[in-house]
Image (cartoon, rainbow, N blue to C red):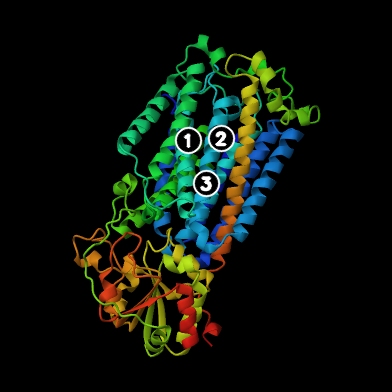
Amino acid sequence: MSANLAALLYLVAGVLFILTLRGLSNPETSRQGNLFGMVGMALAVGVTLFLLGGRGALGFGTISLIVMGVVIGGGVGAVIAQRIAMTAMPQLVAAFHSLVGMAAVLVAAAAYLAPAAFGILGADGAIHGLSRVEMSLGAAIGAITFSGSVIAFLKLNGNMSGAPILLPQRHLINLGVGGAIILLIVLFSIAHGVAGGFFFWTLVLLSFAIGFLLIIPIGGADMPVVVSMLNSYSGWAAAALGFTLENTALIITGALVGSSGAILSYIMCKGMNRSFISVILGGFGGETTAAAEGPQGTVKRGSAEDAAFVMKNASKVIIVPGYGMAVAQAQHALKEMADMLKREGVDVKYAIHPVAGRMPGHMNVLLAEAQVPYDEVFELEDINSEFSTADVAFVIGANDVTNPAAEDDPSSPIYGMPVLKVWNSGTVMFVKRSLGSGYAGVENPLFFRDNTMMLLMDAKKMVEEIVKAM
Amino acid sequence: MEAVDPTIFRLAIFVLAVFVGYYVVWSVTPALHTPLMSVTNAVSSVIVVGALLAAAATAGPSHRWDEANSAPAPVADAPAAEPDAAPSRPFAWGRGDDDDDATASAPEASLGSAPAAAPAAASAAHSSGGGWSIGFARFLGLLAVVLACVNIFGGFLVTQRMLAMYKKKERSAAK
């Protein structure tokens, strides 16, 4: 296969990846988009194998090892994909990011060790200076993605406390390590001989370290941003290596993924009214602001029977799911409850806050899993005006995203965050395990209002009892 | 007019693709943001092409030698600096570009024994570089193939699984 044909086919693969993302603009076209992605991937892999075969680089031993690698990796991936619970998607995505990051580091290291195979040797037998910059960028970003994603995975999976771990002088340490990495990249690009190797491996090690240092101070509440940010990093790492490999498919993909992750981070930050910088600097979401005062008062507790009675006689109910629903696996019971309400002639809708759950769009997937039609599910800005026409707002496992303090209390840490105005509806029902504050450690004054009914129990059990009571 | 470095064209592709990505991703419906993350994860594993190149690395020279942007290295330093094509040729697993028929000659030696042969090769080869680094590169490449494949299969399949769940309101379900 000629190099020109190969380059064209890589371009086709890149275009197929663009169409993959394009397909996601609508659930109807998304499945086709995913198919495009698979075709693009198969094309890129096929072209590469053809090129290697044509170069005589594919001996029997090599090809059987590659096939073995594909079978092992693919098998593991396929099994995970079939078995993973939808509630565990954030962890899974974090784990996948770490793999992309590690693969980028490995490819960059291999390119450094065997530059001839990547065609980046100059006539003088040394690697091009520009290629050195590209590969060290790829390795550095890949390493940051890897160690950062491992920490994110551990925090999301509960192996590690979601509370931020704050080292003394962490900003200084991070700045120092970051500066050292940049310096090493510059030194590596102009160095040769043994010194070059020293620079390269040191900058890889430092990058692993800084990925770790960057993520440990970030609290659990900011994890949606972190996961999106690491998504972006994995893209930039791939793009940097795309330059090293002179591969259009990789450059296009890296750019797409990089900007996709960046946009998702932006949306998540906006959803929490936090600046990207303050998320990166970390420390939020774990401090015990211990909302000492705040509007204390009497709380009206309700039973499942009360809730069932009120909702059955309502004409419109808006359900606000949050992470608590995911933890309790209550989405199926919730769907059952909604179906019963619909049979009673109640108009049922779902309202989703952008940062509900632990990753962008997490609630939507969980509702889809419970076979809630996606045209009953609305985003914040589309449904916020409808709460005033609703008789009941049924908040299940969410808290901070409904806190009116975000609108009227400038001293609140979440002031300015866009929230679902559930308090405009006739009755607000909160399904919660306890009266504790939410993830951001902020008291919700809504609990003490007259038209609020607290349903304190495990979300799944409560919903099941409401269904029984109907 | 002097020739433009191909890297500039790649940079152009990159910059334009960032813009394409920007507009395409903003058009993604928020309901599909989780599948978006898992599918971008899967497609970024196209890095597997680099892993394949590494896994099939040979010590021979590649097709492209004469780029304008070579490192500003004094020629005298070069042989010691980077793996040099010629000295590594004699090793069985360090085949050149042109011997296509080697496929059958030493199949299991082609990679399986590479790590084992590394110490001997290292002493025989130049101070830094030479054959052992190719063997190590192939090992890293293979590892990267495995990791990327977990991602490719896992990413696309889990995306497919999620997307299959998104359904419109069915008339029959309302009963």
Visible residue check, residue B61: no
Q: Identify the chain of the residue marked 2, using the numbered disc in the image.
A: A
Q: CA distance from mark 3 to mark 2?
A: 13 Å
User: Is the residue A245 above or below the residue A338 in the image?
Assistant: above
User: Is the residue A442 above or below the residue A39 in the image?
Assistant: below
Identify the residue at horizontal 65%, vertical 49% (top origin). A74
Q: Which residue is tagged 2? A: A107
Question: A165 or B5, which lies in front?
Answer: A165
Identify the residue at horizontal 48%, vertical 39% (top origin). A142
- Counting from the top left corner in percent of width and height, residue A65 is at 71, 38
Kind of residue at disc 3? Ser
Mark 2 in CB contact with mark 1 (< 8 angstroms): yes
Question: A109 or A300, which lies in front?
Answer: A300
Q: CA distance from mark 2 to mark 1?
A: 9 Å
Question: A4 or A159, which lies in front?
Answer: A159
Q: Dot 3: what SS?
A: helix
- Counting from the top left corner in percent of width and height, residue B108 is at 77, 31
Q: Identify the chain of the residue marked 1, using the numbered disc in the image.
A: A
Q: Residues within 10 Å of mark 1 (few under 14, many from 20)?
A: many
Using residue A71 as the reference point, say whether residue A174 is left or right of it: left
Q: Which residue is tagged 3? A: B44
Mark 1 in CB contact with mark 3 (< 8 angstroms): no
Visible residue check, residue A186: yes
Q: Which residue is tagged 1? A: A138
